[in-house]
Amino acid sequence: MYLGKVGVIMKHLLLLFILFTLMIVSLISCDLGPESPRGFSLPEGNVDSGKLVFLKYQCLACHQVAGLQAPEGTINNDKYNIKLGGKSTQVKTYADLLTSVINPSHKFAKGYALSVVQYDGVSKMKNYNDVMTVSELVNLTTFLQSNYQLVPYRRTVY
Ligand code: HEC
């Protein structure tokens, strides 16, 4: 079909307009708030297996989780008695939760003296990145998540 010069220009303008509109729509739809669907989540794990991981790595040595008794033989590090779960914590989103396990120094738990929870900007929490498997982390995160009231988020589709 022969459109003529003006027709071709109009067609280009229309295409540009459509592209521009699509760009604006996609920018608006991926808001940057805590509920943003952007981000990343591990695959869904298993709560019970995650609880076993939590016990295996002796997280209870420094932490408390409502309703979870430390089995006999758990080290008890009285210096730290940091509550995990609930609402009034630094952990508000899924990303906060995951980050607080793989990079504890990223943010420090709220409600504790800084001198108790960190030294020189480094969290006193142990780092498990070289010993914990990814499968363990997947289950552990699912277990921890079941104890927190996180901001709703959209899971990564696997
Ligand atoms: C040697 C003590 C110690 C051990 C063991 C330990 N943590 Fe921690 N953890 C801390 C301290 C201290 C903090 C507070 C400072 C910070 O937020 O990094 C903390 C913070 C956290 C937080 C963030 C809490 C909040 O509300 O901000 C999470 C989640 C957490 N730990 C999970 C774990 C898990 C899971 C394990 C076991 C795999 C574990 N911790 C083992 C000392 C420990």
Image (cartoon, grey):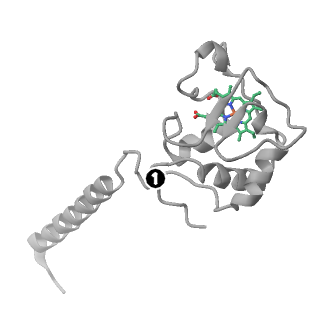
Q: How far across and how far down the image is residue 89, in percent? A: 52, 34
Q: How far across and how far down the image is residue 66, in percent? A: 64, 44
Q: Nearer the viewer, residue 4 or 150?
A: 150
Q: Is residue 121 above or below residue 133?
A: above
Q: Is residue 55 left or right of residue 47?
A: right
**Ligand 1 within 8 A of label 1's CB?**
no
For the C terminus, the image quarter is: bottom right
Name, please, the residue furthest toward the right: 73
Q: How far across and how far down the image is residue 131, in percent? A: 84, 41
Q: Which residue is mark 1?
A: 38
Q: Is residue 32 above or below residue 79?
A: below
Query: Residue 46 occupies which quadrant of the picture?
Result: bottom right
Q: How far across and how far down the image is residue 50, in percent? A: 73, 54
- Kind of residue sitting beneath label 1: Arg
Query: Measuring 67% from the left and 20% from the top, which residue is drawn there?
Result: 122
For the N terminus, the image quarter is: bottom left
Q: Is residue 42 left or right of residue 11?
A: right
Q: Is residue 21 above or below residue 126?
A: below
Name, please, the residue furthest toward the bottom: 1
Query: Measuring 14% from the left and 67% from the top, which residue is drawn there?
Result: 9
Q: Where's ligand 1: which quadrant?
A: top right
Query: Residue 138 occupies which quadrant of the picture?
Result: bottom right
